[in-house]
Amino acid sequence: MIQQTNKSTNRQTTPQELTFRIRGMDCAGCAQSVENGVARLDGVEMCRLNFTTELLHVTGATAADDIIKRVESLGYEAVDPTDDSDETANQEPTNHSFWQFLWQRWDTRLALLGALLILPGLLFNELLPFLGLESMWLNLFSVAAMAVAGYPIADSAWRTLRINREISINLLMTIAAVGAVIIGAYTEAGLVMVLFAVGEALEGFTAARARNSIRSLMEAAPQEATVLRPCINCAGHMGQDGYTGGPCPFCGLEEQRVPVASLEVGETIVVKPGEQIPMDGRILTGHSAVNQAPITGESQPVAKEPEDTVYASSINGNGVLQIEVTHPAADNTISRIIKLVEEAQAQKAPAQRIVDKFAKVYTPLVVGLAALVAVVPPLFFGQPFWNPDASTQGWLYRALALLVVACPCALVISTPVSVISAISNAARNGVLVKGGAFLEMLS
């Protein structure tokens, strides 16, 4: 189930808090489109989506199903943020190269295919006319590259315009590319769309690497533990005194290696010298010096004895400890630290809020300015609207060039990625930062 305070997915009458993980976003513009689309639903009081963490937080009297359908109608996917079995969640790049990342999703594969299609035009479009050869086929390659790489971009632009009634950056680039084809600048049309598609994929790759930097904190905790459990279906005592299976009443507790997720509160785990403590708990037997630096940052080991508390990811010293589990794996110390860091990443810094406001008005302003550039000189000053010859550029061409160079994606993505990278790096080094606003206070 999607995380929510009210489990019903029917129409709600009281406010509830819902959390989703949004898949398929490549840039901050995608996140803005989803956030605005969900905010338009009836009953939504607050909607906040952080591109770098992929977490969408919604407060209001809106059903989870309605939110999921709205996200899907915009071309993205909303999933349970706690579902580790989600296959897409495991596709984030860790040590993968950018090219491996491009091959993981259909839209990034189209960007890669478009890049391959544009290569003949870039390599030979100037050479063939010099040799007196026809370049028509190369123009077709350029148009094909524009269509292939630009399909996800145009589709997103149309969805945003139809559902959110907004002019997005994707619409800006689609108009520029189609206009370039109309005026005969085929290679430029293909190149612009391919570069934009690859650029968005690069933004997605950068944000995914930043997300993985915080997820790597989980790797600090062991994934298995040694637990004391009774022998099950003991073959050596089967049939004795009516024993037919299940926990054996004749055998004592035995050590078993199990995933930490299967441990329950109250079970007893055994931690041997030099091992990491897998779960938060209370020492039942044993004495040791425990290195708590991964959790508390203390440089010296701390002496532990029965009834003392120990934390997951701490390192046991030279004693054998039997520990009673006091918290499930999803609520141990390291999990709570990760949750706090993700909440800190979701808090926008003042600079990020300024950039978000800037992006909302910037794109419509650029489209309007480009329209004026294309129309005013021909109408009032007698300047050429179309390209009059190969050596002269008309004002339509200049307006399309303005649309291309005015794309603010790099500015919009720079602030959130910088914030999440700083918070993640600080967390890996034992420093917890409450949010981006506090980072700016340090600068």
Image: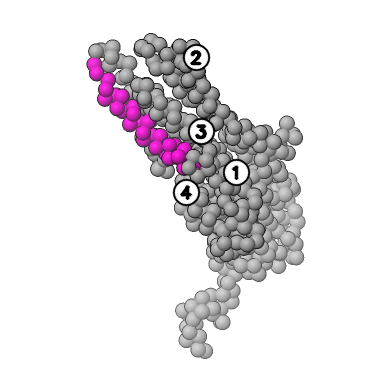
Residue carrying label 4 = 73
Mark 2 surroundings: few (<14), some (14-19) or many (≥20) residues within 10 A: few
Query: Which residue is pictured at 38% across the width and 10% down the height?
Result: 391
| SS type, badge 3 | helix
Q: Which of the two discs, 4 and 3, labels the residue nearer the N terminus? A: 4
* Figure quadrant of the C terminus: top right
Residue carrying label 2 = 380
Q: Residues under labels 3 and 2: Cα distance?
A: 29 Å
Res. 381 visible in picture: yes
Q: Amino acid at mark 1?
A: Asn
Residue carrying label 1 = 50
| SS type, badge 2 | helix
Q: Residues under labels 1 and 4: Cα distance?
A: 19 Å
Frontmost of labels 1 and 3 is: 3
* Figure quadrant of the N terminus: bottom right
What is the image's colouring? one colour
| SS type, badge 1 | strand
Query: Which residue is pictured at 39% across the width and 24% down the height?
Result: 180
Frontmost of labels 2 and 4 is: 2
Res. 97 visible in picture: no
**Residue 126 in the image: x percent, y percent?**
33, 16
Query: Which residue is pictured at 44% across the width and 36% down the height?
Result: 153
Residue carrying label 3 = 169
Q: Residues under labels 2 and 1: Cα distance?
A: 46 Å
Q: Residues under labels 1 and 3: Cα distance?
A: 18 Å
**Residue 306 in the image: x percent, y percent?**
74, 65
